Structure formats: C-alpha cells, structure tokens
Image (spheres, rainbow, N blue to C red):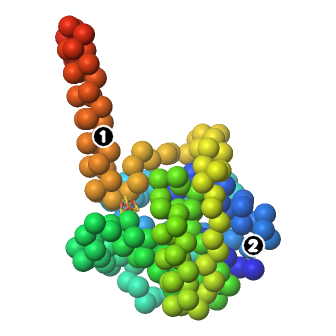
Amino acid sequence: MRLLLHCCCGPCATEVVDHFRGLGCEVAGWSFNPNIHPEEERARRQRTLAEAARRMCLPLVEGDSGERGGEEMGLAQFLLALARREGRRCRACYELRLGATAREAAGRGFDAFSTTLLISPYQDTSALAKIGRQVGERHGVEFRFADLRGSYGESIERAREMGLYRQNYCGCQFSALERAERRAGRAIGKARARLARGREPEP
Ligand code: SF4
C-alpha cells in the first residue's frame, strides 16, 4: 500500500514513519502546514523535516497537484476558517491540513493517507480520527488511523539522537501566545510564593 503521510514536523515523523513502514506501507511524506507562524518558524520546521527525511530515506512529495494554490493560499484559508469557527480552532486546522492531504493523496494515486499529528499527546486524537475519515471519504482515499501517543517519548529520544530542532509550541500564533501566557502565569506564581515566604522575587 502506498501511503501519503502528512508531516507536521521532523521529530514527530520519526516514529510515525517507522510505524507505517512496519505495517508494510510504502511511505512518502508531505508537508502542508500553513498554520505555522511566523514564516521563519515554518521554514525552520521544513528544514528539520527535510533533514529527518534524508536520515530516514523518506521521499518527500514536493509542491502540490495544482488545485490548492500552495501554503500562501493555505494561510488565507486557515485564517478564514478560524474566523468562521471561533472556539473550534484546532478542528478547523485539522480539516484544512488533512483535507489538503487527502486531496493530494487522491490526485497522486496513493492508496491511503495519514498524519504525524497522531503521535502528539497535545492533539485531539478523536477529532483527528473523525476528520481524517470524513475528508478521506470526500476524496475517495482511505485514512489510516493509529493511536500513536504511546510512542511520543521515543520520538523525542529519536529527535535528540538525530540532533533535530524541537519546537516548543504547536504552531499557530494563538498557540505561541498561549505558551507565553502559561510561562508568565508560572513566573507570577513563583514570585507570589517567594513574597509570601517574605523573600524578594527573583529578578
Ligand atoms: S494549536 Fe495547533 S492544531 Fe490548534 S490551531 Fe494552532 S496550530 Fe492548529
């Protein structure tokens, strides 16, 4: 079976590629992540994926089959989807990326498609499964689901061994802001605790 694997980043690709290869699939990777902000971060993740693919002998499918208009158009679609689906940001993001992957897989004659997002404990696996099946049916190509969250630790270890860059936020501007908020909240909590113990907050 030829499988087109949507790759969110290099570190997550490591174990997911091995999983599908272990099932006998001939895997090719494809990166479509117009949600990632800013542009330099997206370019850095792309370079990291290219390095991981080189090390794993994973062919990467370049470009698109011409209907979608590339990641620039994808960013506009992403922002539009968010405006229409307020409060369901990640679902809109999955629909955009998995929908494009299903279309690409069908257009290039793959038997199935899947996504490296399935390894992340930070993603909504049930939503990915549901949306993957829906877009697969729409484009007439099978979505291969596997709950791979148990292998997340191994993917981190593999990325360390390979010296791959590992990002510390999901990708979009909102997730970057949420990370900054969490960090600020922790810093404030620590400063309050020190003050409560009669100490000066750390500079
Ligand atoms: S947090 Fe991640 S999955 Fe959710 S919208 Fe942002 S980039 Fe997409």
Spatial distance from mark 2 to mark 1, Cα to Cα? 40 Å
Mark number for residue 91?
Answer: none
Q: Which residue is mark 2?
A: 25
SS at mark 2 in the image:
loop
In this view, the residue farthest toward the front is 196
- Give the residue type that dot 2 points to: Cys
Above or below — where is 18 with respect to 88? above
Crowd class of label 2 (few under 14; some 14 to 19; many from 20; radius 10 Å): some
Callout 1 environment at 10 Å: few (<14), some (14 to 19), or many (20+)?
A: few
Question: What residue does disc 1 label?
Answer: 182
Picture coordinates of residue 184 (x, y %)? 25, 35
Give above or below for 60 relative to 182: below
The residue depicted at 41 percent of the width and 85 percent of the height is 68
Q: Looking at numbered disc 1 in the image, what kind of residue is underneath it? A: Arg
In front of the other: 2 or 193: 193
Is residue 8 depicted above or below 4 in this figure? above
Residue 53 located left or right of residue 131: right
Percent across and percent down for residue 87 are 28, 66
- In which image quadrant can residue 159 be found? top right
Residue 109 can be seen in this image: yes
Q: Is residue 140 left or right of residue 188?
A: right
User: Which of these two is toward me, 195 or 142?
Assistant: 195
